[in-house]
Amino acid sequence: MSARSNLFALDQAGLRAFFVRLGETPFRATQLMKWVYHHGITDFAQMTNFSKALRAQLPGIAHFALPEIIAEQRSQDGTCKWLLRVDGQNCIETVFIPETGRGTLCISSQVGCALNCRFCATGRQGFSRNLSVAEIIGQVWLANERLGYFRQRQRIISNVVLMGMGEPLLNFDNVVTAIALMRDDFGFGLSARRITLSTAGLVPAMDKLSKASKVSLAVSLHAANDALRDVLVPLNRRYSLKALLAACRRYAEAQGGAAITFEYTMLAGVNDSLEDARRLAELLRPLPAKINLIPFNPFPDSGYTRPSQSAIDQFRETLLNAGLMTMTRKTRGDDIDAACGQLVGEVAPRAKRLERRG
Ligand code: SAH
């Protein structure tokens, strides 16, 4: 086992402590971060503002270890997907989605997922393990590197969404530290508005998050009544819609009234009736809410289908008429299985799924 510290695992506070332990000034932390996160340099020998002695000492005690890129696929629409090996048994996926005026990176927080939402390909695979801080921030670093950011110094990734594989709030500490690195001006310098954490609705962790970090919140709703949500999102059996929406209100208030995005994957004949839309509007009207309709992305043996375009449009109209800001998420990268809910990586499941446990 290597005794060297992986410096991708440390945020600014952690790096300061690291340098202080070496008898160096804590100021080395931000110098190092500029090399790594602004210039893409992880070779200590090139860190010319460090003394020769420090440059010689560091490789023996520290390194920068990243997931390994196994495959890089580019979709016809410019979406880019990477398959990353994180250990001998497991791979995760990361997706970049270019749009006019912005570029969004969708990152994973766990290998697999324990929540087993019925219509999600990741959930079908079971859960293997949490990703480390280095594996989470490493996805952002690698994507920046591959997209040419460090060479051009022009921002390509303007937004990061934790909407890839896994439930970020079940990997709380590592996710919060990685977000700190994304937000830090010496890190990737992204504002809280440009980082979105998506959760299936882990109520206690939502409250904890609003104290521990500053980040935009998205909530995977998918149903406007408990009976249906119990089936689609088994976590609802623990935290009902009422408890979830109360937590959303507390989160929005703690963040100064910032809107929460509600994701609603549209499943034909399951949750796409106009009655569903009206009930959804009633539930969300009291909140600072934006609704993101996600047309279902199929995968083998899912048992679900996508509603027709006109059904999706009418659903959206109903919400708009009720005064709710509603967008339909464009399906991107589906020719390379990079669309929402299609990320699978390679997962060696260890734990049983939530549903079977409870
Ligand atoms: N576990 C977190 C993060 C995943 S975000 C969460 O649930 O929010 C991924 C989003 O895509 C979630 O809203 C998820 O419900 C949705 N999704 C999953 N499978 C999908 C599919 N096959 N088609 C469309 N959306 C899907």
Image: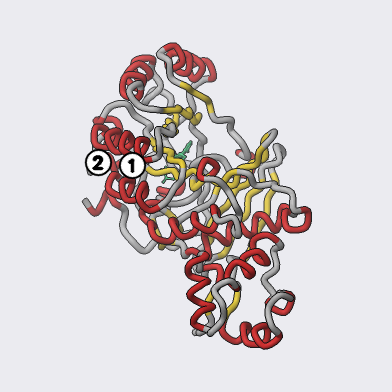
Most foreground residue, 357 or 32: 32
Task: Compare marks 2 and 1 and give the one earlier in the sequence.
Answer: 1
| Residue at 63% over, 87% down | 57
Q: CA distance from mark 2 to mark 1?
A: 7 Å
Q: Position of residue 313 (x, y in %)?
A: 51, 17
Q: Which residue is mark 2?
A: 239
User: Splitting the image into 4 quarters, where does residue 263 fall?
Assistant: top left
Secondary structure, mark 2, is loop
Q: Which residue is mark 1?
A: 201
| Residue at 44% over, 56% down | 175
Badge 1: few (under 14), some or many (20 or more) residues near its Cα, within 10 Å?
A: many
309 on left or right of 237: right
Q: Are marks 2 and 1 in contact (CB under 8 Å)?
A: yes
| Residue at 34% over, 29% down | 223
Quadrant observed for ligand 1 in the rendered image? top left
Ligand 1 within 8 Å of disc 1? The answer is yes
Looking at the image, is 34 positioned above or below residue 245? below
Q: Amino acid at mark 2?
A: Tyr
231 on left or right of 99: left
